[in-house]
Each structure stands twice: as C-alpha cells, then as structure tokens.
C-alpha cells in the first residue's frame, strides 16, 4: 500500500510540473506575440 501511495504522489508531482511547464510556455508565447504585434504597430 505505501509503495502505491509513493508512486501516486511522485506521479502527481510530475503531472503538476508538466502542467505548469506547458502553461508557462503558453503564457510566454502569448506575451511574445503581443509584444511583436505592438512593436509592429509602433514601427509601421
């Protein structure tokens, strides 16, 4: 039972890390897109 619980906790940590990584990359891509659009509007 304890081995199963440890495995589940470790998997949850991996899953949460993956979710936060994907969210961070998405937010970074969105910010880069907005910045590029703003710069394009300013310099055009």
Image (tube, grey):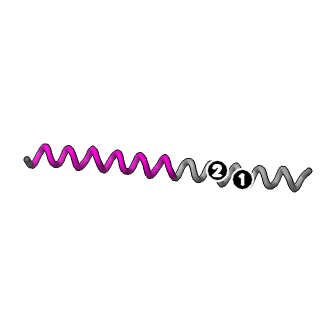
Distance from label 2 to label 1 (Cα)?
6 Å
Secondary structure beneath disc 1?
helix
In the shown orientation, is residue 6 left or right of residue 16?
A: right
Outermost residue toward the left in this view? 44
In the shown orientation, is residue 8 left or right of residue 16?
A: right
In the shown orientation, is residue 12 left or right of residue 7?
A: left
Label 1 Cα neighbours within 10 Å, binned few <14 / some 14-19 / many ≥20: few
| Number of numbered discs | 2
In the shown orientation, is residue 32 left or right of residue 20?
A: left
Label 2 Cα neighbours within 10 Å, binned few <14 / some 14-19 / many ≥20: few
Task: Name the residue at 17% across, 48% down.
Answer: 39
Asked whether the residues under the numbered discs 2 and 1 touch, taking CB atoms below 8 Å apart as contact, a structural biologist would say yes
Q: Position of residue 44 (x, y in %)?
A: 7, 47
Q: Can you tell which mark lies on residue 29?
A: none
Which residue position is annotated with label 1?
A: 11
Q: Which residues are magenta?
A: 22-43
Secondary structure beneath disc 2?
helix
Task: Name the residue at 72% across, 53% down.
Answer: 11
Per the picture, the main secondary structure of the magenta-coloured stretch is helix
Which residue position is annotated with label 2?
A: 15
Query: Is residue 41 inside the magenta stretch?
Result: yes
Query: Is residue 9 inside the magenta stretch?
Result: no
Outermost residue toward the right in this view? 1
Task: Name the residue at 84% across, 50% down.
Answer: 5
Q: Position of residue 29 (x, y in %)?
A: 36, 50
Q: Quadrant of residue 42?
A: top left
């Amino acid at each position: 039972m304890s081995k199963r619980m440890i495995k589940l906790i470790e998997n949850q940590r991996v899953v949460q890390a993956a979710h936060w990584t994907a969210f961070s990359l998405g937010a970074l891509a969105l910010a880069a897109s907005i910045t590029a659009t703003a710069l394009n509007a300013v310099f055009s």
